[in-house]
Amino acid sequence: MTKMEHENLQIGPEIYGELLQGCVYERALYTGQQIHARILKHGDFFSRNDYIATKLVVFYAKCDVLDAANSLFFRLRVKNVFSWAAIIGLNCRMGSCEEAIMGFVEMQENGVSPDNFVVPNVLKACGALGWIGFGRVVHGYVMKVGFDGCVFVASSLIDMYGKCGVLDEARKVFDGMIVRNAVAWNSMTVGYVQNGLNEGAIGVFYDMRVEGVELTRISVTSLLSASANLDALEEGKQGHAVAVISGMELDNVLGSSIINFYSKVGLIAEAELVFSRMIEKDIVTWNLLISCYVRNGQIHKALNMCHLMRSELLKFDCVTLASILAAAADTRYIKLGKEAHCYCIRNNLDCDVVVASSILDMYANCRRIDDARRIFNSISHKDIVMWNTILAAYADLGLSGETLRLFYQMQLEGISPNVISWNSVILGFLRNGRVNEAKDMLTQMQSSGVQPNIVTWTTLITGLSQKGYGDEAILFFQKMQEAGIKPGAPSITSALSACTDLVSKHHQNFIYENAIYEIAFTEPESLPGIINHLLKDVDLLP
């Protein structure tokens, strides 16, 4: 262009347009700004040309320069589908999803019909906001203008319905596609994982392999996430194998997904091996392995990883600190917990909700109730997790009066108690020997519309059995079954203990003998060694 100017050759709008388009492809912001400066230098003939003005809007939008793109867009005399598509796409990428949707509405009001480049961005905005109603409106527009045959639009519909939790609609769109690319398949898989339908995600992955669809990182990471959530060992290992056979680079995303899977299924050595083979590791990767160690009780390894992180000049973030504090809580290692707390204060991490909850939980587990209470009082915005943590701390110590007072205070501050909150109050009363109050709380809990879970029933059965109320412990065990709750080993153990006590008291009364057998065979796979241990003294085993 400079040579053309030196030779006094005429440079028309088309030349500037092509140059700007090249800058769009390369995302060459600085070069594009220089071209813009030359356009302005040549006066209004070029700068007010509709073709060049539109190209400038597209250029700045694609380079994510929001202020410049918006300023030029609002000055356009004629806003065509290309300028609208650029500005809607920009708003969507920058997180201004409502503005993107309003642009979709406004362009139609101005007589410009959205094309199959605009629609995917609007659907993405609907998914991000969870606006299923407007998403269905856009779907109707897609059907009306015949864009449903476009694989990119259909994939965006699947993604939108998945993010809004309407998997039936997503599946209908997917099944109705004549041609499906990897994006469509991945959108369906991701939708299943995001909504906890992990079996569906694994099913779609296997269908992809049967159909011969090229598997991508998204395909494999989705399978690994679903496998981790289901503890599906073989499926997850197959996902890892597919990644290796396909020659996928072990980058941060894929590597972290594989480590997360092995961590969830308890294969620590495999997680360590993958970690060691990753060339580049970000903070997420380190945190995954640290949390893996903490979850599996290998605290010394978790702390060693923390030291290695520091040697790599990586700073701890909120997730790292939450893992360290969890390790301190599990081991009641108050010195480590205090050191982690001090680090949080020095680095302004103690304001984070998760970190603050972890600090509170650490002090509570270490039986430092006064320190826990000080942390709790210092938090300005307390969520349900923090309230439940402090309730559990007081309940565990048998301080039922303060537990109940906090339980009422949380409601006065606008926090509705959930089943965990109620369980803590019941536990506090039982620890303090106040059995009638514990039973009253169960009644109030059910009256308020909160249904007891397995923890509620187990807490009552265990507490009543320990306090010598064997008859009532067995009664609550039966009520738990009537409520459709499958007993676990702790509730069965406590019920059996109550039965043996009653057999001893009633000289092997057949009612309690039958109760022992009924309980014992309720969940036999959960009872290795339990029945023999509890019944050996009453000679009731065949």
Image: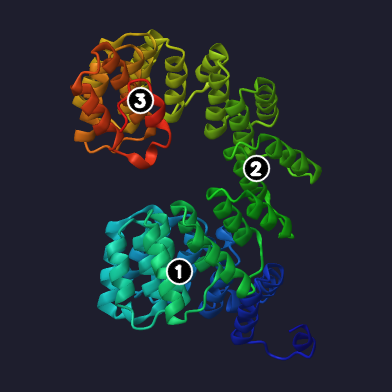
Residue at (38% x, 60% y) in the render? 199
Instruction: Give the CA separation, mark 2 to mark 1.
Output: 30 Å
Residue at (63% x, 49% y) in the render? 268
Q: Taking the image as drawn, is residue 154 in sight?
A: yes
Instruction: Report the amino acid beneath label 1.
Output: Asn
Q: In the rendered image, which quarter is residue 496 located in? A: top left
Disc 2 target residue = 290
The vertical placement of 155 against 329, above or below, is: below
Q: Secondary structure at mark 2?
A: helix
Instruction: Report the amino acid beneath label 2.
Output: Ile
Q: Secondary structure at mark 1?
A: helix
The vertical placement of 125 against 446, above or below, is: below
Residue in front for this viewpoint, 127 or 210: 210
Disc 3 target residue = 535
- Report x, y in % for residue 54: 52, 75
- Report x, y in % for residue 422: 32, 23
Disc 1 target residue = 186
